[in-house]
Amino acid sequence: MVKHAVIVNLNLYWVMKMIKKVLIANRGEIAVRIIRALRELGIESVAVYSTADEKALHTQLADEAICIGPPSATDSYLNMERIISATITSSADAIHPGFGFLSENSGFVKLCEECNINFIGPSYNVIENLGNKSNAKATMINAGVPVISGSKESITNINKGILIAEEIGFPVIIKAALGGGGKGMRIARSQSEFKSSFDNAKKEAKQAFSDERMYIEKYIENPRHIEFQILADKYGNVVHLGERECSIQRNHQKLLEEAPSAAISEELRNKMGNIARRAAEACNYENAGTIEFLLDKNNNFYFMEMNTRIQVEHPVTEAVTGIDIVKEQIKIAEGSKLSYTQDEILINGHAIECRINAENPDNNFRPSPGKIEELHMPGGNGIRIDSAIYQGSEISPYYDSMVAKLIVHGKSRDEAIRKMDSALGEFILTGLITNIGFQHKIINDKRFIEGDIDINFINDIGE
């Protein structure tokens, strides 16, 4: 009996490997977000940066900062060897990947495991399975999760892609097999349209994710994009933190998110949430992840993909649940059990997030890099800003155009809308063009106010 107790304690000690220093393999607002969480947990932080980001806020806030290359993401934030080298040089014992870049690259996770570096996220095998859309679909079918018809495996050959598209039936959506964020994604409504769409999506996927494998899926017209936040520990405990409404998007890139969704009843939330948990359990998932669904007008829902990382829009879930998702990620990676059971997770009020981008809505949303001359960010009760900008900082042309996330929390959806309307009016940023005015237009659109939205909302805004 005593011998058994000793073995259990030794196993627990092995699992509970405390993290003392974390390298953040990212930049911008998510790097700043992670640094702040690490500070609150008493863990040291190491920032990495390209030469274009030498004066970036995340390099100034971190305990250490290491240059990993020139401005091109391929030579810096996507360079696995340089990031691993920086981790070893700084004696960091863990890496937090944030989102984008290498966050869903199974090869990078495998390299971390081989170098005995604690990757704050799922294992190599899980990311390899779920990060690949065709593999993920097969896993979900086996778990009894409703899916959309699509290719059984990833492809690179356009002729094979056309045959699959004709078998499924147009319209189809072409997606990067590895990655997300709307990159490497095109809709094709005919064979002729498929050819150019496939080539363009393939090139974009190669540039964004260093992987040109594609996935073909039936395109569902005018659905809502609903996603469920998942947390799972090393002991098989899985919870969901409710849903996020992510239907306001342009070119498959989200612009505005909210939690909860105006279209989801408590009964439907429980049904979708339980299926999301089942999906995570089926693949022995660990850490934070997101199960994404398409919801049609008849409340039929279909698994779309799983993001094996923290999401850009995670703050709206934090606002309505009171749970710090980034801290939970770090604790899970250390070997801690989940801090909450499903019954303890409650949805409180309503939250909305607007992505503030340096882009010109009047010129096809063309990026607008430059130097911030004047900056005033809104504040007050229930208002949160996640950003890495400051007055005088440079917005680089090399990376994503998002400069800030404006998050509001109210007792109801109506109150949250009014609060966001006020906060957008208070947001002052000069020196470059932003989408603040466009976000204001969305918030005041009659259809949005009534909750009558789908993924094509932006296409006819203002009508």
Image: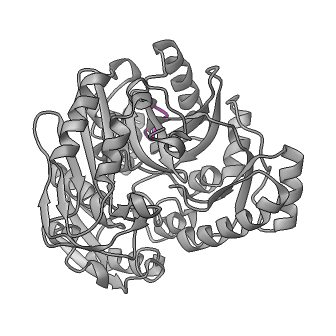
Where does the image place residue 334, in percent across and percent down from the top left?
34, 49
Residue 348 picture quarter: top left
Where does the image place residue 145, in percent across and percent down from the top left?
67, 30
Q: Is residue 387 left or right of residue 344?
A: left
From this viewpoint, which residue is outermost toward the top? 267
User: Which residue is drawn at the image coordinates 55% and 40% (left, top)?
Assistant: 455
Q: Is residue 33 left or right of residue 391?
A: right
Instruction: Out of 389 and 436, give the one closest to the viewer.
Output: 436
User: Which residue is drawn at the image coordinates 66% and 51% (left, top)?
Assistant: 133
Where does the image place residue 419, in percent across and percent down from the top left?
21, 33
**239 shown above or below 189:** above
Q: Is residue 205 left or right of residue 72?
A: right
**395 shown above or below 402:** below
Look at the image and tell me whether residue 186 can be seen.
Answer: yes
Q: Residue 211 colored magenta?
A: no
Q: Is residue 81 left or right of residue 437?
A: right
Where does the image place residue 426, in percent across and percent down from the top left?
15, 46
From this viewpoint, which residue is outermost toward the front? 463
**339 shown above or below 362:** above
* Magenta range: 232-238
User: Which residue is drawn at the image coordinates 39% and 48% (left, top)?
Assistant: 15
User: Which residue is drawn at the image coordinates 24% and 31% (left, top)?
Assistant: 409
